[in-house]
Image: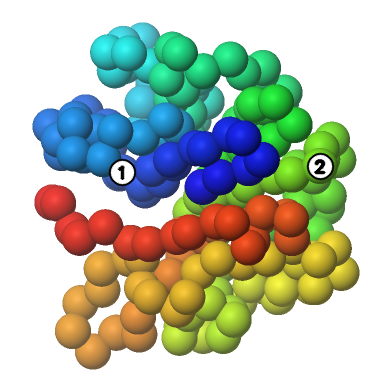
Amino acid sequence: MAHKQIKIKILQWNIRSVNSNRPNLIALIRKIDPDIILLNETWLKPEFNFFINGYVIIIQDRFDGYGGVATCIKKTIIFSQCKNYNNNHTQYIIIRIADLNIINLYTNSSSNISIPLLEDIYSDNPKASILMGDLNSHHPLWDDSPINAGGRAINEYILKNDIIILNDGSPTLLQPPGHCASAVDITLVSPNLAPIASWNILPDCG
């Protein structure tokens, strides 16, 4: 991901427990050397000590030890923390690097993402933004699963606000045989970033 003179490599992963998948996470970091790591479903509680050498970590834990997000930033990167949000269904963290907002969002499958939530997330939108996360939302624009209310809300919002989805239809969630391919992990960027952004899925490391 590049913006003006800033080149940023972002790793986004619905990790489903950073404790269980820590060895795979460390292996990925060593392999691709990301500048920013956006983790969904961290499954942490405040008393857990989660750290990665060389990174500053901002965490929003869910009270029951499930869900949750973590944004990890290389210590060499200057950033500011814009906004955090946390309730029983949705967690997000927004950081800013120069004039770029990076949004790490998780919303669970029982609570579809909504227009008001997206409006709140983008209320302090600078010249450029990247939103990544497990939104548990389905729409033909990015996957083959049956459309749901979250998918409709995202589609309506991005059409009205000229936001670009980088997903190319590739599934981001492993499904049992006979199930529809699913791409619940979504990346949205402002239109000025779309021509210079690249997006791809890494092989399963589980």
Q: How is the image coloured?
A: rainbow
Residue beneath disc 1: 15
Specify whether residue 135 is in view.
no
The foreground one among 196 and 107 is: 196
Give the mark, 2 or 1, whose residue is nearer the N terminus. 1
Q: List the single residue furthest toward the bottom.
A: 178
Q: Is residue 141 left or right of residue 101?
A: left
Task: Report the mark closest to the observer, 2 or 1.
Answer: 2
Kind of residue indicated by mark 1: Ile
Residue ID at (43%, 25%): 72
- Kindly identify which numbered label has been placed on residue 127: 2
Q: In this view, does 157 lie to the left or right of 152?
A: right
Q: Alpha-carbon distance for marks 2 and 1?
A: 30 Å
The percent position of residue 175, horizontal first and vertical second, equals: 26, 73
Residue ID at (55%, 66%): 166
- Kindly identify which numbered label has been placed on residue 198: none
The foreground one among 167 and 135 is: 167
The foreground one among 185 and 42 is: 185
